[in-house]
Image: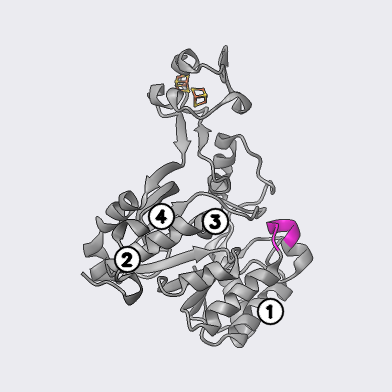
Amino acid sequence: MFRPEWLKGLPAETHMSSGIVFNIQRFSIHDGPGIRTTVFLKGCPLHCAWCHNPESISLEPEISFNAELCERCGRCTAVCQKGAHVIEGTDHYLIRELCVQCGRCIDECMPEALQLIGEEMSTEEVITEVERDLPFYETSGGGMTISGGEPLYQFDFCLTLLKEAKTRDIHTCLDTSGCAPNSHFKAMLECVDLFLFDFKGWDPVFHKKYTGANPASLLKNLELLIQSGAKVILRCPIIPGYTDSDRHFKAIAGLEKQYPSILGIDILGFHELGRGKYDRLGKQSLIQGLKSVSEDQKNIWLEKLKSMGCSKAKVG
Ligand code: SF4
Ligand code: SF4
């Protein structure tokens, strides 16, 4: 088996650990080259107003309750020792403040109206799942992508997964917001084949208000990756009313000019898929009423970027 130099001489258990995973998506074709398995890690230091993965933000496992699937059978109320489920007539309330995430009600719920989002998995369990599709990676040039949330929020687990994938000669992608210590990105250099790096803005006031982070530290991490010779594709969510200004498009084109080694720029449009997830988690979306972006609109943005000299952009 292929084993990189930096892993030789270390016992296997050195690399084993566990982390909180909220999804493993097989046959993914949008998270890097070829057919991939995308591992979604829970936890993110940002709170982007347009986030469509609200289940990824908290590191803790969460209960998702889909009222449309609930048959009001009362089995959950019977097993919940905390009184967190209240059924009154046709209404069913989940009092989240009382829930201790014991999981009893989830086991009782036949129509799966209740689900636990996020479970602890060992490195071995995740890698075993990833290895199921080795033949597809080999024929398509695919591999494993670690996404989130922000995958570096679970830095040790993320690093371990990537190292284990490399010991198996599996191509690796890291889908990152860029929001992590510089030292964490340095540690990633040897075990990530391709970074999918978000660019959400450059204006500190805008960025802080709508994502919670200072863009300077994120761009410093991008600079580190580029200067280190890492392969990078920029991913740019274009959110109407937030990141669709000419100044923002110029900034994207400026990054391509500043960093000619960037392999590509993916234009990602807002979509409404996350809206139902907010309801099911008992959370509120920070932006309301925004509709999914059409393919035509994305192509208009693409043409605009090209007119600004951005030759590597494509609709992602
Ligand atoms: S167990 Fe499931 S279907 Fe039955 S009342 Fe509870 S949530 Fe609804
Ligand atoms: S997970 Fe446990 S505490 Fe929470 S609502 Fe279900 S039974 Fe009650």
**Residue annotated with mark 2:** 10
- Residue contact between numbered discs 1 and 2, judged by CB atoms under 8 Å: no
Q: Label 2 to label 4, Cα distance in Å? A: 25 Å
Position in image of residue 194 (x %, y %): 43, 73
Specify which label sits upstream in the sequence, 1 or 3.
3
- Depth check, front residue: 180 or 273: 180
Q: CA distance from mark 4 to mark 1?
A: 33 Å
Precedes in sequence: disc 4 or disc 3? 4
Residue 36, image x, y percentages: 34, 62
Q: Secondary structure at mark 3?
A: helix
Q: Are marks 4 and 3 in contact (CB under 8 Å)?
A: no
Which element carries disc 1, helix, strand or loop?
Answer: helix
Mark 1 or mark 2: name the one nearer the start of the chain. 2
Query: In the image, residue 187 lies at what x, y percent?
Result: 48, 70
State the residue position of label 4.
Answer: 39
How far apart in space, not on screen, are marks 1 and 2 (Cα)?
Answer: 47 Å
N-terminal of the pair, mark 4 or mark 1, is 4
CA separation, marks 1 and 3? 30 Å
Q: Between residues 282 and 103, which one lies in front from this camera angle?
A: 103
What label sits on residue 250 in the rendered view? 1
Q: Secondary structure at mark 4?
A: strand
